[in-house]
């Protein structure tokens, strides 16, 4: 880590010369002025200087450029030329003059506002040469370049004013006058100035005056802590004064009138102080007619000033002094400007000139003058010891120590605000003392709201932190309550409660709702600070316990309590506490019947019920837990529900009047007073229909035992009273004087409509009323039927139990109960049942019949009676009973359940007519007889369900019988199994499993019948392929389905086959008699191996058993001894003649062939697994090993050879096609292409051998020597741990074999073939075959772009070198031309431009070309001249290389560069100045020609390159080869291919498919040629014109080479040295056409120049080509 302190010490101790820091004064001032971005900055600073000088008056004079006669409107629109600011303060002292010219040296007086010493320099915003006059001295500022200078002088006379004269550098705009007047009014607020005047061209525009009353001290309440948060500031005292601001301004300064009428509100103190009326003078509307008139306005303020004693540590004081250039003051002041409601009402607060003075929305922080920072409350705060930012517009809260200081000052401001609030509230308390709540609201609530709004904190701007400091000081300076106006006057907040909806308490001080709404923000802050709280339960409980509630207050209390409960503000316990302590006064009646209000107390805590006047009368007696209606008439059902009071029910009220009869007076006794009894009955009757059955029963139960029924015979209990309709006897007690009572109530109570049965039997059954004969049972029934509606239920019950009827035949006097007899019907009589004796016709729907049925007369016999009849000895009656039961089953509603559970045996059977069984002992399905069960008689089977007879027996019982008695033969088995098949839905899985493991299936065995378990049986005949191995049965479709349900399978499962194969492999093979079938079985097992492998026992059995099929090759000829050379294909074919033998062996003895090539060498010694992926995995899982693991490979690598470009190309090809191979292959990948790129190297060696030794289990069986052309082997290199070794004659297949062994986990033979195909096929062919080569092409394009960038860098370097050479050449020529002799020679030399242009020594001229045989077509014109000149070069290339293959021989280089390259017939044209062209100029021209080459598809326009004048140039020729071809495709190298326009789409496709390899080879040649010239590859193109004799052409800088010549000359041999030189010279020829278009000596010259220039690079490429 760097030690910075040591570095600093070393630097300070250096001997280097020290240097002072210089300052650009003009730039510094400009930067300072950039911080003063607000308006009136200059005036503010100058007025501040006046205040610091204790001035009382300031005059501001503007001089504007006007014409004589201009009016006021033009005056205020004129340009300002000069500003003069005067003050009557103290004249400048010498230190003031000195400090004035020193920037950043502020006023050291800590009591002054100035701090930074840069405020005065704001004058430079308008002027360059300010001038100051003070006392008898003057000072002028002036500039020298960027430095500022001053000069002083003395005057003879002393000026009473200090004047600042600012002559504008350019006339400027006059400030907005209204805004300027507002600025002056605000500036006058806190400073010591008393007057500010404004003049424009000596016209008095504004006069502002300030009057201040004498200061009065304010007491600091003891509850307020005067210290700030950290204790740095302490308020020691507070004084306050009243201030009046008067303004007189010309109307021209205000374009809009301030039409405000202010009502008189000035206090008497203000009138006394200022000695005039508080009502301001009225103002007229300002228009063009009164612009020169004056308007006046006044406002009244209160300013409180707090004396602050500071206490700050020495370290903090030092930091502050460093930051402010003055020590922190020991004492300072803070002032706050507020307005009481009286002052606000008395002020012309709507006057626009005082808009910024009145803190109506939010006050501002004043640091001498207002800043942009607001206070957050409706009060201005002036604190000149607060440290502002440099421009004095904001408070500095960035630097730590400054931030802490300002935070303490602002906190002290909050404490001052708190003191002012307490003082305002104290004055309000004195004025409001002793007033009633209504008077308080009328007189002082608004004033209290004004005070609270004035100190309601909002977010301050632009910094919220400032307001937060003030807010914290205001609220944290006391821990006690704050003064508030309540409904009882001004009290501490801890004695006041928030409860706007509590109106029922008289003694508790509450915060009025009007104040809460008017000062919501202040109240919210009080609540958050905890100074005031909502009214508590304890408060209400204490108040309730002090005094009972009047009737009206009690209703309000209950209404409020209900609302609190509904809103969830009170819980049950709190409600009970409040109700328990509340006592309400209820009204009552006196002796005269008059209502007396609030006469009786009632505890609300015991109340449970309320009265519903619509149900009960209001004047009835009530229980003590029921609240009278007079207190609940304003409450709703919701209120009762909230209070958990419920409406008193009629039954509860009846219980009260019946149980409290001894405590109630006589007139309210239900047993003694018929009138009150009638009232009770009437109330019950009115609510009877609305009462529930239960309620009715309870009311009847309470009243039926009370003598509550008035009768003629007195008060009777209900059952002793009779309705007036009962007239059978004259002496009965008939009800009397009962009104408004419903009959149904009286009936329910028991009032009788019939005579009691006992009385009837006593008076009528013994002797008739007329003294005649007795009544019979028929007469009695007819009488009772007539009065049946009036017979009580009790009498009906007695009648049911009374023996009063006779039965047929009438042979005795015995009487029966009605319920013991049946109706007199013939069908019932045939059954022998007792029937009612009824003389005459029996009518089914007569009144007597219905009444008798009500008493219990039987209409039909019950089930039990019929079952007894059906089980009797009489067969005929049994059948009648069964028939009657079935015929009347639905009509009589007989119960099947009752019959089915009967223990009476009455059901006849199918095969045994004499035996009867119970319904649950037989079944209706005749097939169940197969299992030995009883079956109901056939004719009863359709109706068996009505008897409750089940269709089939329980399936478990059937299964038990099947297991106990399995079938004896196939026929019985079919019957029983088919029965179970029909009941498949009843067979559960546990039962099926149980049957599946039971021996119930009969099969033929050696000794007779053999029983098998269903799970071990298979469905099918014996002809199944596994029929001889497994047991197959067939009992028919239905029976087979049952067996399958029990576990029988259509055929064996794979697991079962596998077990059987492990146990009896030879038997299975003999049964199959085919290796294909056996392998098919193995394949099925292999497919399910993932599931089978979970069976550990099966796995062990398969591993031990010789059950796996394998092949062994038995050669027909003996194996040959291994030779040193690899065998020929014919020899390998001969050796492959063998016989394949199929064997069964253990898995451990079988090998999985993973290397087919090596297998061919050792196949006679190997048991090979079948070539199937699934079988190989299966064999491997059982213990077979890959063949490669038993073959030892000992590689032998020859010596390394030099690495050529072909090796690098192969390396790139391997990495490129490996990606494509991995993408196209679905086998498991061991290493991806990125791994190959980082871990695989490629090297060329002389030979590769490998000794293969087959060594199963360590025993050597055979060995073989293998020759390869490629092999992948691990190496010891750290960076590339694997290496692909290849021989000079490597083959793609060997490369693919080595790569797949590295890429794939388990390579297959086809994998190597696929990779070989990808390696040996070009990309375009692969693309046409459907391979996705876009990514590879994109990569090649990216590589091409990188190569192009590299090429452009080299070209740029060459261009710079040539520029430098040309510059040196021009210098040399200039120096040479300046020599006298040279200049004289030039003057004498004749002008012979034509001669000079005609030739130069060594130049080629147009001579007839020697007759040579053209190479192809008509191309001899070019090649006779081109290749003739380079025949020696081609011959040299064709010779065997004697030097290094990578570079040309020195002899070749020398021959080409020194020997003139022209024919013997070529002659040198004499003439000219014989001066040769500079070599660098020739090189530059060649470079220009190369750079002029362009892509044929380029949008650019070919421009012939600028060249140096060269004397070796000649004539012009024209070609138009590009008009007959069109674009076809782009090769991976980026070179485009063109074909004749006459080609069809089919021809184009065939061309690409047939010539893709050749096109790639040809593009590789052109690609390397482009690299020689550092030429963009896209500038070379391939065109195919088989009918054209043109080898190549240049059109517009795009070079085209004819592919047909490549096909004829070079495709067969590929990229040879001769082919490369041929096309390189061709491109040199075409490049020369960028300089010369014609074929002539000039063109030949440039062609040879290209060859000379790029010979070395070309030969390096030639060395890489094959011979």
Image (cartoon, helix red, strand yellow):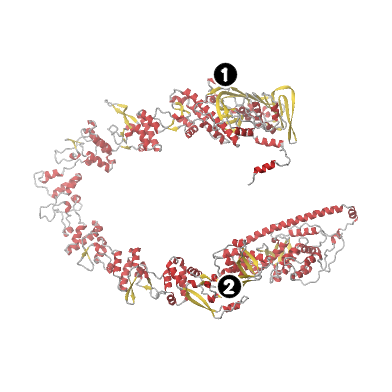
| Mark 1: few/some/many CA within 10 Å (<14, 14-19, 20+) | few
Which one is in front, 421 or 1168?
1168
Position of residue 1083 measured from the top left corner of the image (x, y, whole percent) = 47, 71
Which one is in front, 716 or 608?
608
Tally the numbered discs.
2
* Mark 1 lies on residue: 275
| Image quarter of residue 1335 | bottom right
| Mark 2: few/some/many CA within 10 Å (<14, 14-19, 20+) | many
Where 101 sits versus 1635, above or below? above
Where 192 sits versus 2, above or below? above
Could you say which disc has been placed on residue 1003 in the image? Answer: none
* Mark 2 lies on residue: 1252
Dot 1 falls on a residue whose secondary structure is loop
Dot 2 falls on a residue whose secondary structure is strand
Q: Nearer the viewer, mark 2 or mark 1?
A: 2
| Image quarter of residue 1609 | bottom right
On-image quarter of the C terminus = bottom right
Position of residue 616 measured from the top left corner of the image (x, y, whole percent) = 29, 35
| Image quarter of residue 911 | bottom left
Position of residue 665 measured from the top left corner of the image (x, y, whole percent) = 23, 30
Position of residue 108 measured from the top left corner of the image (x, y, whole percent) = 65, 29
Instruction: Measure the C-alpha gap from mark 2 to mark 1.
Output: 131 Å
The mark that comes first in sequence, 2 or 1, is 1
In the image: residue 542, left or right of residue 857: right
Where 1569 sits versus 538, above or below? below
Q: Can you see residue 1160? A: yes
Callout 2–callout 1 Cβ contact below 8 Å: no
Q: Can you see residue 1541? A: no
């Amino acid at each position: 880590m760097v030690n910075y302190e040591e570095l600093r010490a070393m630097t300070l101790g250096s001997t280097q010369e020290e240097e002072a820091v210089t300052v650009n004064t003009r730039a510094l001032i400009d930067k300072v002025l950039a911080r003063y971005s607000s308006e009136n900055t200059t005036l503010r600073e100058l007025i501040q200087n006046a205040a610091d000088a204790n001035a009382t008056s300031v005059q501001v004079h503007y001089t504007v450029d006007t014409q004589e006669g201009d009016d006021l409107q033009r005056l205020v629109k004129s340009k300002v030329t000069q500003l003069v600011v005067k003050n009557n303060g103290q004249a400048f002292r010498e230190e003031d003059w000195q400090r004035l010219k020193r920037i950043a040296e502020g006023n050291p007086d800590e009591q002054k506002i100035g701090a930074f010493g840069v405020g005065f320099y704001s004058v430079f915003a308008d002027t360059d040469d300010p001038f100051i006059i003070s006392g008898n001295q003057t000072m002028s500022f002036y500039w020298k370049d960027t430095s500022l200078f001053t000069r002083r002088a003395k005057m003879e006379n002393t000026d009473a004013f200090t004047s600042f004269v600012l002559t504008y550098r350019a006339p400027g705009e006059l400030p907005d006058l209204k805004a300027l007047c507002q600025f002056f009014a605000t500036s006058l607020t806190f400073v010591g100035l008393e007057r500010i005047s404004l003049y424009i061209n000596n016209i008095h525009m504004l006069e502002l005056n300030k009057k201040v009353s004498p200061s009065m001290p304010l007491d600091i309440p003891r509850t307020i802590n005067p210290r700030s948060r950290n204790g740095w500031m302490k308020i020691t005292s507070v004084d306050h004064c009243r201030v009046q601001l008067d303004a007189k301004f010309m109307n021209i300064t205000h374009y809009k009138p301030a039409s405000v009428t202010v009502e008189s509100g000035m206090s008497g103190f203000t009138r006394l102080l200022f000695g005039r009326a508080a009502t301001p003078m009225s103002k007229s509307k300002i228009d063009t007619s009164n612009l020169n008139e004056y308007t006046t306005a006044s406002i009244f303020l209160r300013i409180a000033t707090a004396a602050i004693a500071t206490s700050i540590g020495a370290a903090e004081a030092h930091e502050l002094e460093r930051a402010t250039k003055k020590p922190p003051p020991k004492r300072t002041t803070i002032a706050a400007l507020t307005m009481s409601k009286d002052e606000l009402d008395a002020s012309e607060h709507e006057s626009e000139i005082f808009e910024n003075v009145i803190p109506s929305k939010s006050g501002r922080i004043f640091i001498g003058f207002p800043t942009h920072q607001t206070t957050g409350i409706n009060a201005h705060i002036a604190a000149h010891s607060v440290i502002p930012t440099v421009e004095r517009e904001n408070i500095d809260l960035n630097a730590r120590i400054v931030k802490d200081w300002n935070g303490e000052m602002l906190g002290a401001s909050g404490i001052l605000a708190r003191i002012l609030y307490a003082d305002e509230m104290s004055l309000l308390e004195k004025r409001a003392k002793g007033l009633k709540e209504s008077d308080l609201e009328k007189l002082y609530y608004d004033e209290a709201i004004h005070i609270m709004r004035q100190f309601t904190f909002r977010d301050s701007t632009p910094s919220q932190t400032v307001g937060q400091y003030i807010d914290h000081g205001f609220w944290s300076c006391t821990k006690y309550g704050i003064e508030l106006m309540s409904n009882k006057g001004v009290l501490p907040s801890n004695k006041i409660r928030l409860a706007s909806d509590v109106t029922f308490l008289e003694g508790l001080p509450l915060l009025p709702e009007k104040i809460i709404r008017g000062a919501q923000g202040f109240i919210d802050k009080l609540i958050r600070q905890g100074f005031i709280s909502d009214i508590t339960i304890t408060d209400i409980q204490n108040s309730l316990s002090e005094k009972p509630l009047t009737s009206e207050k009690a209703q309000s209390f209950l209404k409020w309590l209900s609302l609190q409960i509904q809103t969830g503000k009170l819980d049950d316990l709190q409600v009970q506490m409040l109700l328990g302590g509340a006592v309400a006064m209820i009204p009552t009646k006196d002796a005269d019947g008059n209502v007396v209000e609030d006469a009786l107390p009632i505890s609300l805590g015991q109340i449970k019920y309320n009265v519903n006047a619509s149900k009960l009368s209001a004047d009835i007696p009530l229980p003590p837990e029921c609240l009278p209606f007079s207190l609940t008439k304003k409450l709703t059902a919701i209120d009762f529900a909230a209070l958990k009071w419920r409406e008193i029910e009629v039954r509860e009220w009846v219980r009260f009047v019946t149980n409290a009869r001894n405590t109630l007076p006589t007139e309210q006794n239900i047993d003694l007073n018929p009138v009150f009894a009638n009232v009770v009955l009437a109330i019950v009757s009115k609510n009877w229909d609305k009462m529930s059955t239960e309620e009715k029963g309870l009311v009847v139960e309470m009243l039926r035992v009370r003598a509550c029924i008035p009768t003629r015979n007195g008060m009777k209990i209900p059952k002793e009273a009779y309705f007036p309709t009962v007239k059978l006897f004259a002496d009965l007690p008939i009800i009397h004087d009962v009104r408004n009572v419903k009959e149904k109530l009286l009936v329910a109570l028991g009032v009788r409509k019939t005579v009691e049965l006992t009385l009837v039997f006593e008076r009528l059954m013994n002797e008739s009323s007329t003294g005649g004969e007795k009544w019979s049972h028929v007469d009695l029934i007819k009488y009772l039927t007539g009065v049946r509606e009036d017979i009580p239920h009790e009498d009906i019950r007695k009648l049911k139990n009374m023996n009063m009827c006779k039965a047929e035949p009438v042979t005795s006097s015995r009487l029966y109960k009605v319920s013991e007899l049946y109706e007199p019907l013939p069908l019932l009589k045939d059954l022998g049942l007792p029937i009612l004796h009824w003389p005459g016709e029996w009518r089914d729907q007569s009144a007597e019949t219905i009444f008798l049925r009500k008493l219990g007369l039987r209409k039909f016999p019950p089930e039990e009676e019929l079952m007894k009849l059906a089980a009797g000895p009489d067969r005929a009656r049994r059948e009648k009973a069964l028939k009657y039961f079935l015929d009347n089953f639905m009509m009589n509603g007989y119960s099947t359940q009752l019959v089915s559970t009967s223990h009476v045996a009455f059901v006849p059977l199918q095969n045994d007519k004499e035996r009867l069984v119970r319904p649950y002992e037989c079944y209706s399905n005749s097939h169940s007889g197969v299992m030995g069960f009883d079956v109901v008689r056939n004719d009863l089977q359709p109706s068996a369900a009505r008897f409750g007879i089940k269709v089939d027996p329980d399936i478990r019982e059937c299964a038990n019988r099947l297991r106990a008695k399995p079938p004896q033969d196939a026929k019985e088995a079919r019957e029983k199994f088919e029965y179970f098949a029909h009941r498949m839905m009843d067979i559960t899985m546990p039962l099926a499993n149980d049957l599946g493991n039971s021996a119930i299936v009969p099969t033929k065995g050696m000794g007779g019948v053999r029983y098998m378990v269903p799970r071990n049986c298979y469905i099918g005949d014996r002809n199944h392929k596994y029929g001889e191995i497994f047991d197959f049965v067939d009992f028919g479709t239905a029976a087979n389905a049952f067996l399958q349900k029990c576990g029988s399978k259509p055929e064996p499962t794979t697991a079962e086959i596998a077990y059987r194969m492990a146990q009896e492999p030879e038997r299975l093979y003999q049964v199959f008699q085919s290796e294909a079938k056996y392998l098919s079985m193995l394949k099925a097992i292999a497919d399910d191996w993932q599931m089978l492998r979970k069976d550990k026992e099966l796995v062990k059995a398969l591993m031990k058993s010789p059950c796996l099929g394998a092949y062994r090759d038995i050669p027909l000829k003996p194996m040959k001894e291994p030779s040193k050379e690899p065998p020929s294909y014919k020899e390998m074919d001969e050796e492959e003649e063998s016989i394949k033998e199929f064997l069964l062996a253990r898995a451990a003895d079988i090998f999985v062939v993973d290397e087919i090539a090596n297998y061919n060498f050792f196949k006679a010694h190997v048991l090979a697994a079948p070539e199937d992926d699934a079988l190989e995995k299966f064999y491997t899982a059982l213990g077979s090993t890959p063949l490669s693991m038993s073959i030892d490979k000992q590689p032998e690598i020859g010596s390394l050879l030099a690495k050529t470009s072909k090796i690098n190309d192969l390396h790139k090809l391997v990495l490129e096609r490996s990606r494509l191979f991995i993408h196209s292959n679905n086998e498991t990948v061991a290493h991806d292409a990125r791994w190959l790129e980082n871990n695989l190297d490629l090297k060329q060696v002389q030979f590769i051998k490998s000794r293969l030794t087959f060594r199963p289990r360590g025993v050597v069986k055979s060995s073989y020597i293998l020759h390869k052309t490629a092999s992948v082997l691990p190496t010891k290199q750290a960076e590339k741990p694997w290496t692909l070794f290849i021989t000079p004659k490597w083959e793609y297949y060997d490369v693919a074999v080595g790569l797949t062994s590295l890429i794939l986990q388990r390579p297959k033979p086809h994998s190597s073939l696929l990779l070989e195909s990808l390696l040996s096929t070009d990309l375009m062919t692969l693309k046409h075959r459907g391979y996705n080569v876009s990514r590879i092409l994109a990569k090649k394009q990216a590589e091409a772009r990188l190569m192009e960038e590299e090429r452009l860098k080299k070209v740029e370097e060459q261009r710079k070198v040539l520029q430098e050479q040309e510059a040196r050449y021009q210098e040399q020529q200039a120096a040479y031309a300046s020599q006298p002799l040279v200049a004289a020679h030039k003057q004498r030399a004749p002008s012979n431009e034509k001669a000079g242009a005609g030739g130069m020594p060594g130049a080629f001229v147009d001579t007839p070309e020697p007759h040579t045989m053209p190479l192809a077509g008509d191309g001899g014109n070019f090649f006779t001249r081109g290749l003739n000149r380079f025949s020696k070069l081609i011959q040299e290339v064709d010779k065997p290389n004697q030097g290094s293959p990578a570079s040309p021989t020195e002899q070749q280089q020398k021959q080409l560069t020194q020997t003139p390259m022209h024919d013997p017939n070529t002659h040198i044209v004499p003439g000219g100045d014989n001066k040769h062209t500079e070599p660098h100029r020739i090189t530059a021209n060649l470079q220009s020609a190369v750079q002029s080459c362009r892509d044929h598809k380029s949008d650019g326009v070919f421009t012939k390159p600028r060249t140096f004048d060269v004397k070796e140039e000649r004539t012009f020729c024209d070609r138009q080869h590009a008009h007959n071809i069109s674009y076809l495709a782009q090769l991976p190298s980026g070179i485009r291919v063109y074909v004749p326009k006459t080609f069809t789409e089919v021809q184009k496709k065939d061309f690409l498919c047939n010539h893709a390899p050749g096109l790639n080879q040809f593009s590789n040649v052109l690609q390397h040629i482009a690299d020689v010239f550092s030429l963009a590859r896209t500038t070379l193109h391939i065109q195919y014109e088989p009918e054209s004799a043109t080898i190549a052409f240049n059109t517009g800088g795009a070079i085209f080479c004819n592919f047909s010549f490549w096909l004829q000359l070079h495709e067969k041999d590929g990229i040879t040295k001769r082919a490369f030189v041929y096309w390189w010279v061709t491109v040199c020829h075409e490049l020369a056409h960028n300089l010369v278009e014609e074929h002539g000596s000039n063109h030949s010259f440039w062609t040879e120049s290209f060859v000379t220039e790029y010979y070395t690079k070309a030969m390096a490429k030639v060395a890489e080509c094959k011979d």
